[in-house]
Amino acid sequence: MSYQPVIGLEIHCELLTDSKVFCSCANDFGGGENTRVCPRCSGMPGTLPLLNQNAVRLAAKAGFAVDCTVNNYSAFDRKNYFYPDLPKAYQITQFEHPICTGGYIDVCTGRRIRINRIHIEEDAGKLVHDDYEGVSMADYNRCGVPLIEIVTEPDFRSAEEVRDFVSMIALRLKYAGVCDARMEQGSLRVDVNISIMPEGSGVFGTRAEIKNLNSLKSITRAIEYEIKRQSEILDGGGKVVQETRRFNDNHGDTKALRSKEEAHDYRYFPEPDIPPVFITDDELEEIKSSMPVPPHIRKARYINEYKLSEDDAQLIISDKEFSDFYDGAVEIYPDYKLTSSIMLVELNRLLNDSGKTAGDLAFSPRKLAELVKMTAEKKVSNNAAKEVLKIMFEHGGSPEQIAEERGFVMSFDENAAEKAVEEVIEENAAAAGEFKNGSDKIFGFLMGQVMRKLGKGANPQIIQRILKEKLGKE
């Protein structure tokens, strides 16, 4: 039988605060086990949580980034359960009154994925398993790290849609300064709720939850495996059990962890030690106005107004600093396509070779705009522009000054060009004869010889015209 997957996501994102959500311990990645933990974030008796206001601000920014309604009122609850990585046996979260509701993202297939809610909560610690000794050890450094959980509706119908959605969520959160979205470090983790139903049916099947997926590749593989596993169960006349499962990256399969809990199993009740959060309309407007232009809006502008290709627009927005630099340059000199070409080809190559980012550049967007203008106005050739850009990348400086000092300014001296052409034809009589006899490919060689004589300031348009005239091809 053919089946249709039905998928919803719970995405946990670590917030970019300096300290944890309810204490002053540093919110950093790495470090020795249990070196960033205190009585408050480990929930020792007699301690009280103190809410990090910046975590609330970042959660509101996350809501605006995905078109949510950010609520004026939200409140915290206790989610009661005991795991070894949560020493106080409950998690502070938001259940009844989350900070954000609604929202959506349109994915690659055109489907609109609805966001149910975004709420703030604290992270748990982690277990370090020693298979050799047969023991598990708890590292509580991550206890109390501020999270938002983004909960979607079950609107996905393929792994491709999930992959696209997670990529866009990660990019939007990075632009907003909410989360660095480093999945390999666990700062963005995805739980996938997946069921299948017969094609054409409107009745959802029994779902399984796949926990803590931390790469786009793992998400895709886990979904594909789970569709296959549930299909085989149903085809064999069995029933899918509602449960929580773990994806094994090495084996490419999922294994049962525990039966899937429902909300009532956690015995939620209001957190007595944290007062409700009130955000005024003025405060929300100030937060919203402080946010940068998001990536999907920039991409639409690049394609519709600047007439860039979709691929080029996507490459530019894939890094906020790079996109900011591009925007700064074209605001000064609006040659959108030439600026895009220089940045995506030459500048990207220099950045990749050096390991730097656009934020490390030794020159400003204004200086790049000056170089683009010089190139567009034929003051320097395309090849000379590459040389100037490389010098700017390594040492900074003015493109005009660099071009003057290095002899890159394009020459319009037709007499000098004509003399060089005549010398090259004389020195390469055989090649010139081949061209006259129909071997067009030899023309590039002759052009190169003339440009070598004239140096970096050679004007290829003038050389090409004179060369053709002298060879009788004009």
Image (cartoon, grey):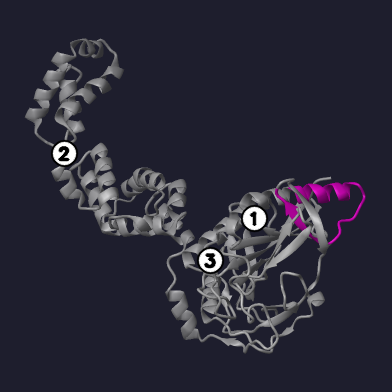
For residue 179, the mark is: 3
Q: Is residue 55 visible?
A: yes
The residue sitting at 31% across, 56% down in the picture is 330
User: Where on the picture, by quarter, is residue 361?
Assistant: bottom left
Instruction: Give the image location of residue 106, x and y in percent.
Output: 58, 59
Task: Tell me the tag on residue 410.
Answer: 2
Which secondary structure lies at badge 1? helix
According to the picture, the residue beneath numbered tag 1 turns out to be 162
Q: In this picture, is 64 found above or below 405?
A: below
- Left or right position of 360 against 208: left
Q: Earlier in the sequence, mark 2 or mark 1?
A: 1
- How far from the left and from the top, in percent, is residue 251? 74, 45
Which secondary structure, mark 2? Answer: loop
Any magenta on residue 235?
yes
Label 1 near label 2: C-beta < 8 Å?
no
Q: Cα distance, mark 3 to mark 2?
A: 47 Å
Q: Residue at x 17, y 49 (%)?
A: 400
* Magenta residue span: 225-249
Q: Is residue 415 left or right of residue 239?
A: left
- Going by the numbered disc 2, the residue's amino acid type is Met
Q: Would residue 155 be seen by someone viewing this image from the given angle?
A: no
Give the amino acid type for the residue marked by disc 1 in the picture.
Val
Q: Nearer the viewer, residue 6 or 257?
A: 257
